[in-house]
Image (cartoon, rainbow, N blue to C red):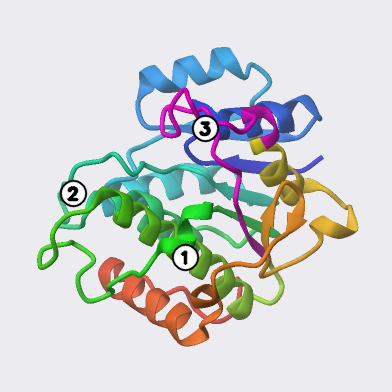
Amino acid sequence: MARVFVTGSSTGLGLAAAKLLAGQGHAVTLHARTAARADAARRECGDAEGVVVGDLTTIAGIRDVAEQAEHSGRFDAVIHNAAVGYREPRLETADGIEHVFAVNVLAPYLLTALMTAPGRLVYLSSGMHRGGAPDLGDLAWRHRRWNGSQAYSDSKLCDTLLAFGVARRWTGVRSNAVDPGWVATRMGGPGAPDDLAEGAVTQAWLAVSDDAGALVTGAYVHHRRQRPAAQMARDTGLQDALLDRSAEITGVPLGSVAS
């Protein structure tokens, strides 16, 4: 049995992955943004070990989520699933951070940096990461005309950079990026062509399976098969620049060795 923490698991892919893992007998801790969503998640996934409640839009909120999760002890795997989508308007969080970047990138970075390193880390990317071209000097989109689709693509490229950068720095941790496909969630919309159930399988598999294909690190995986990531995602200089910029924003460095 593995202990697994799944962020953004009150609905959609996160909930589907959590239910799959709990059904396999693993000890799953859910995460929801509000108490009401947490109650709904408990009803949907009655076998869950616990639920962490917290908002990932602010640095203080992310810290609180990390503290709550750490209180129950070290996890064997963490699935960084929480995200907002490409239809979002430009908003700034209380920290002055553009909210797509805050939730999709800064939250998984800071949770990774603050929590005791698990054996496995799974970061949710997207096929849209191939259109990403993040401007690390203007992450708040103050000097560019807002484009929600571009901001989302940028964030998913950053998630892939994060997964690969962590894999390089923390050689004792399996850190991978997952493309779940375009699935019919609240983010993906009802017309999405891919299967939601299949979309949740890969992150759960990478989190707990002893199959040879799951025992990888620094990989980009779609439907349990490795796929080529965007060439930019393999740029180690860009990986380090993102990690350094995230450390600067949060005041928390990742460090070079898993603790």
- In magenta stretch: residue 60: no
In the picture, the disc for residue 202 is none
The image quarter in which residue 86 lies: top left
The percent coordinates of residue 181 (x first, y second) are 59, 43
The image quarter in which residue 168 lies: bottom right
In the picture, the disc for residue 9 is 3
- Which range of residues does the magenta coloring cover? 174-198
In the rendered image of this protein, does residue 224 appear above or below residue 88? Answer: below
In the picture, the disc for residue 93 is 2
Which numbered disc, 2 or 1, marks the residue that appears first in the sequence? Answer: 2
Q: Residue at x 73, y 33 (%)?
A: 21
Distance from Cα at disc 2 to Cα at disc 3: 22 Å
Q: Residues within 10 Å of mark 1 (few under 14, many from 20)?
A: many
Kindly report the secondary structure that dominates the magenta region of the rendered protein.
loop
Q: Residues within 10 Å of mark 3 (few under 14, many from 20)?
A: many
In the picture, the disc for residue 113 is 1
Q: Residue at x 18, y 62 (%)?
A: 140
